[in-house]
Image (cartoon, helix red, strand yellow):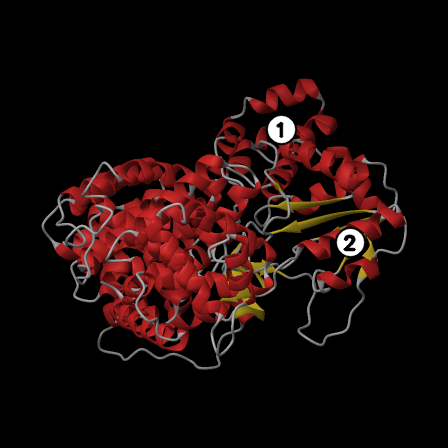
Amino acid sequence: MSQEEAAAGGANPADEAAQEGEQKKREEAADGQEQPRREAWAARRDLIAHGPDFVRTLVSRDQFGQTGGTHYGDQIFHIGGGGGAGATHPRSGPVPRSEVEELAEVYRDCLSFRKALARLRDDRIVFLSGGHDTGRRSAALMLLHRLGVDRIRALDPQTPFQELPDQVDTAAGYVLCDLAVSRGRPLREPHVLALRERLERAHARLVVTVEPSAALGDIPAVRWEPPPAREMLHAHVAPAAGEPAWGELCGLTAVKEFLLRQHRPGEVSRFARELLAYHRGEIDEEKLAAYGETAVATQVTRWLTEEKPGLRDKAFLVSLAVFDKAPYAVAAELGDGLFSRLHRIEDPAVPPRVPVFGSSREDRLRLAHADGYVTAEITEWGPLEGTFCAAFRDERTARILLREVWNLHPSARPALAEWIRRLADDRRPLVRTRAASAAALLAEADLSSALAHLIEPWADGRDPHSWLTAANALTMAQLLGMPTVSRILHDWCTGDVESRRWTAIRAYGLLGPVHHEETLRALVAAMHRQPPAGDGDEDEDGHDGAATEVPEEARQLADALQILLLAVREPVLAALTGLLRTDRAVRPHALLAFLQACRQTEDEASDRPPVLDWYARAVTAEDTATARHLVLFWDALLSDRAHNAQALGVLRGWVRGADDDPVAEAALASLFAALVATPTHHRRISHLLRTLRDAKEAPSPAAGRLYTRLSLD
């Protein structure tokens, strides 16, 4: 019988400090076991924070019909203007009327524009959440223009949000582009309410644009998706060339090929200028076609095959392809390592020479057709202001460059593969994640070679960190749409090689938010081929449980389920609730996953632990199905001998956190009321609340209120 059970059954309870000390020891021991295998949710966070743009699909929670989801994608937030902390600059400035009028002549709206327009009309403020270079600033200007706003002013994104009401002092339209919102710099609802009140008094309106990764919490936002490329191209070309000419121009092969691909508004605008030049007879169709991917591929071929640029600059270009939209210094630093390896292949008799101060950043970016910009990079310690990053102007360049190096220059493969393997051993999460993304892009170019040189050696290594890199690489390869990856993951997950099973299970967990049904089926199948997570006697309620150590592979399965629960939520919760009582193989893994999710304290959308906040939202929204499923899981946790002590420790922390959080206290009151209907749970929870209420040091006010509210005497 556990200490908590003995106390609940009437034994003399130890004081709270002793109980919490024992609980802390158990948790520290568990943490010590988990440290080498890399905590699953943190590993997912690193992948999302530091991966390329296509990794954003991992965080599209709303594709499952969820509400309240917050999206975490690219780690870069663009900051308007220069200067760091302490720099002085104006807080707002007028947007030229001519710019707005020129934009209005060619602007084409879309569904997300109309949604944002309705919200701006009703609420006077709207948040547009969209990726970089998706036309969100143009949309912001046009939203105000469509509502008849004559004067538009741009606000400085570095203005603290709580100071923005002071900047809204006239009846004008305001745009705040690229507001940096993150876990370290969150946006609070009171800030928005105060700003809306000021907008109403001033008869003003405001459009705020943010990255998809912005931590907006409960604040509603419109996900910005630009119009289709064909509609944007028509809006730019037809007014100038005429509708009959537009019909002819659409039939050109170069135009058809251009429209087959995804393009950002800026690219469409530039292609429209080329198309109008063709219409006027200034260029021929061959030059028009060269604007598209052919132009990028031709440029990449020249870089790699001609004498200039030199080998060191060629290595920098490849490094920038791996670290596109990442800090310039990282790409330059690690590019020199690639240069040394390539030089040993090209001229092994001569040691490589790296000039320490011989490169100009501006010249290198000009060579790479790349732009540099100052950003706030998101790190595990919060935003790092003033980071200089670099990005290819054409987003296709990175993929085409890596593909051509790998497929058309096989002599470079040994050096490139060795370099990427060294990146995977770097201490920086960004570098390790980009090593995995490079492997995924090379797998897209030549799967068998990338598997042999990179992914399989990682998966077969002895270090769990290398297994994680392999899992990240396969995850990103799947996101790139490679159909064979699913077969690889299935074979590895059900195979006999332990490290490959670990890799596949982790990859399934990471892919869960995108393919949650397929992932859950695969994980359940893997659970059926594993021994139970714990073998023990049933407790007084007839539930299985054990106090034995959980095998590593069972922990990995639970980690994958934890990611699914926290990232997808309701669909996975409902499915696991159904399996909880009917599938003995799944039950221990599901309980461990739910316990780990409850122990998670970090939630980007709320100050509360994510599962407690989830339950609070379900109760507030009268989502009885979700609330009932969460209660059923808590009932199973408290009834399980392997987990009830840790579960009570989680509840102890939640109660203490509710001392100054009325919403959390109300949620706990509802949860406890549902649980105390069982006599055993009644004893456990009443004992828990009494010990917290009567603690000699730091008694919990919330515990006393909950005890009285539930009438537990």
Horizontal and vertical percent for residue 47?
A: 39, 57
| Horizontal arrangement in the rendering, residue 255 relative to residue 676 (left or right) | right
Please identify the quadrant where the N terminus is shown: bottom left
Labels 2 and 1 touching (C-beta < 8 A) = no
Q: Amino acid at mark 2?
A: Leu
Q: Is residue 71 visible?
A: no
**Front residue of 473 and 163:** 163
Q: CA distance from mark 2 to mark 1?
A: 35 Å
* Whether residue 408 is situated above or below residue 110 in the rendered picture: below
The dot on residue 199 is none
Seen at 54% across and 32% down, the residue is 285
What's the residue type where badge 1 is placed? Answer: Glu
Percent from the top left, x then y, of residue 558?
Answer: 27, 52
Q: Secondary structure at mark 1?
A: helix
Disc 2 designates what residue? Answer: 195
x and y, in percent, of residue 130 in the image: 59, 46
> SS class of the residue under badge 2?
helix
Mark 1 = which residue? Answer: 231
